[in-house]
Image (cartoon, coloured by chain):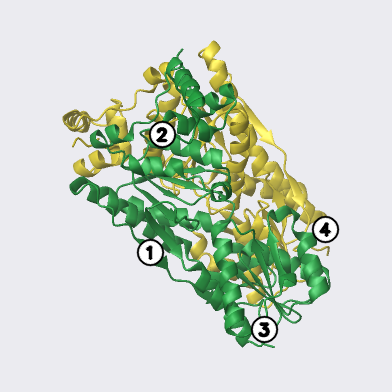
Chain colours: A yellow, B green
């Protein structure tokens, strides 16, 4: 039996990263001559063939869209998939989903696998690790070979392609502006570390809103979370030491976690502290109290992404090489629930 | 450009169902001679080739597992995927996910697409429509050609293959038995229509528990729901007219919906009525009150399913044609929370 050797196996065998193998096979000058030769020799020995998309594309349409997302436990990504499915099915396309589990390597492997004749194009949201590494060669490669990519939510300016995003900065600005207008003056922020693009933008929106209202930016009430499972101590300390009167959290897990910690400390929401979250998922709808939140409209975002990808796929048949990429903004709005009050 | 014609396009062109096309291409005697000839002629004309798995399998392993599930908005399916991913990745396999959206046709199309060289085997949970139609030819076909299938949660006795299930009947029995022991005597049931296999089994567990305690089965407090979006009136009428003192709901959406409707009618949970759900998802954890529920352990179920599939994939290399299929039972237990009290 002849097994096809994979990127991962080559990387393991030669004790280098998957990214290195991938780049070495493409003769990237980022990789040393020695390593390139080793990788290429190994690949040749085991008949590894990097995908030859450009060749296959002209001959065969799969009518399948590949989706690569970081995870599906977040309800937001599940709603985006529903939105993509709807539009894809209406247009006669199937959908295949792969998860990167927030891992750069898994993102590269999945892309490699799907690009190898399984799909006509990609809709994707970047993994945390990819955003941290700023290594997008796998995406650029696929695009260079003529396979369109649409990015949504977690996108990067370093790759030219169609994108669907919300105005994260403006949405966060609006949420914080709302809190200020309700009379709150000591508004805390629970956000992600800066390399997560949407977290960074939402943090900027928070800062801008406070600036515009001449309120000070107080680093003591800004908590940046790397890992949701180990964030309790940081949030508790912030609530305890600085007594914020309101919190803006950049996703719904941060919001519900903040509410639970506040309750544990004897603080009532919204009587003692108001909380606004981001993403209108099922947690926000069913938690106690229900959570006022920025609605992201994942269904609409997915639908738009699918529409953009399909348009590009069908356009390419007529006029190859059109490079006018678009970035579409999806509207957001604040959903008012029980977790906010007026001072 | 030469486009590959799909099952769906043939079906549309000849105005027959996808199932008919699929069967006609396999020369099934269920399909009339005339239709078979038409379909086969059309397929020939457009170079449609049904997947020839047996051939390709021997030559090429994809190291990829295909998952086909009804939907991912239910947190349960998301946790099963996580469980599959973990075990698959540990063993060097990738995972591809497709959704049937509870549609028989989409299940057939997805299976066809993935079986066509993209995966080595399948892990799947049946769509509602497939269970209703009792048409499993697409799955049988794939198995006959030597591609292993593991079914989980929504399974059927009509297909011989490996399966991972919980003992739905026993789990439901235990939940209702618990309610009876707490002193409740007028226990209502919110369940699915009977063709959903797990709903039917959970209903049977409810009936058995009441029988064993010599409590009457009262059809007036049993609500069978076809569509979650249009169930409010039925549940409200049951609560209003029959004043149950406890409710057993066969999934968490039914449980939380029942609680919200009870609240709307001025009933307090658990003071006026106790509620137990099924599936320990995020709704049960964050709803008001938090919901006592049967934990299904999706992670474990997914992990087992992946292990069974991988074992079969690797076994097949040595000893072809081993047909000792197993059905594994995953433990369940009751998670006690705020929605139940003692009388």
Seen at 60% across and 25% down, the residue is B15
**Residue with the mark numbered 3:** B341
Q: CA distance from mark 4 to mark 3?
A: 39 Å
Quadrant where the N terminus of chain A lies?
top left
Q: Are marks 2 and 1 in contact (CB under 8 Å)?
A: no
Q: CA distance from mark 2 to mark 3?
A: 51 Å
Quadrant where the C terminus of chain A lies?
bottom right
Q: Position of residue B175 (x, y in %)?
A: 57, 76
Q: Are marks 2 and 3 in contact (CB under 8 Å)?
A: no
How crowded is the residue under tag 4: few (<14 C-alpha within 10 Å), some, or many (20+)? few
Seen at 40% across and 32% down, the residue is A138
Q: Image check: B71 left or right of B248? A: left
**Which residue is at the front of the view, B66 or A17?**
B66
Seen at 27% across and 32% down, the residue is B55
Looking at the image, is mark 4 or mark 2 earlier in the sequence?
A: 2
Mark in the foreground, 1 or 4: 1
The secondary structure type at the circle numbered 1 is strand
Q: Are marks 4 and 3 on the same chain?
A: no
């Amino acid at each position: 039996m002849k097994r096809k050797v994979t990127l991962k196996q080559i990387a393991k065998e030669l004790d280098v990263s998957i990214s290195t193998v991938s780049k070495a096979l493409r003769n990237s000058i980022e990789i040393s001559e020695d390593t390139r030769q080793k990788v290429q020799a190994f690949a040749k020995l085991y008949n590894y063939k990097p995908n030859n998309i450009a060749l296959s594309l002209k001959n065969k349409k799969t009518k399948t869209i590949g989706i690569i997302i970081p995870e599906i436990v977040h309800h937001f990504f599940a709603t985006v998939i529903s939105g993509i499915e709807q539009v894809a099915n209406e247009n006669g396309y199937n959908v295949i989903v792969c998860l990167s589990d927030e891992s750069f390597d898994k993102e590269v492997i999945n892309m490699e696998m799907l690009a190898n004749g399984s799909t006509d194009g990609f809709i994707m949201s970047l993994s945390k690790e990819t955003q941290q590494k700023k290594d997008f060669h796998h995406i650029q490669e696929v695009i260079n070979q003529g396979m369109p990519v649409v990015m949504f939510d977690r996108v990067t300016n370093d790759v030219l392609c169609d994108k669907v995003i919300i105005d994260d900065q403006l949405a966060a600005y609006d949420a914080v502006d709302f809190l200020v207008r309700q009379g709150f003056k000591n508004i805390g922020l629970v956000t992600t570390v800066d390399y997560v693009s949407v977290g960074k933008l939402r943090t900027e929106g928070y800062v801008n809103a406070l600036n515009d209202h001449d309120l000070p930016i107080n680093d003591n009430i800004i908590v940046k979370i790397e890992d949701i499972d180990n964030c309790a101590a940081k949030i508790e300390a912030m609530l305890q030491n600085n007594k914020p009167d309101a919190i803006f959290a950049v996703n719904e897990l941060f919001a519900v976690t903040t509410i639970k910690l506040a309750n544990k400390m004897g603080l009532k929401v919204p009587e003692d502290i108001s909380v606004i979250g981001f993403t209108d998922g099922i947690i926000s709808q069913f938690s106690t109290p229900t959570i006022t939140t920025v609605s992201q409209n994942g269904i609409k975002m997915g639908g738009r992404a699918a529409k953009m990808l399909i348009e590009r796929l069908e356009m390419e048949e007529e006029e190859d090489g059109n490079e006018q990429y678009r970035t579409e903004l999806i509207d957001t709005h604040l959903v008012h629930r029980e977790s906010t009050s007026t001072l």
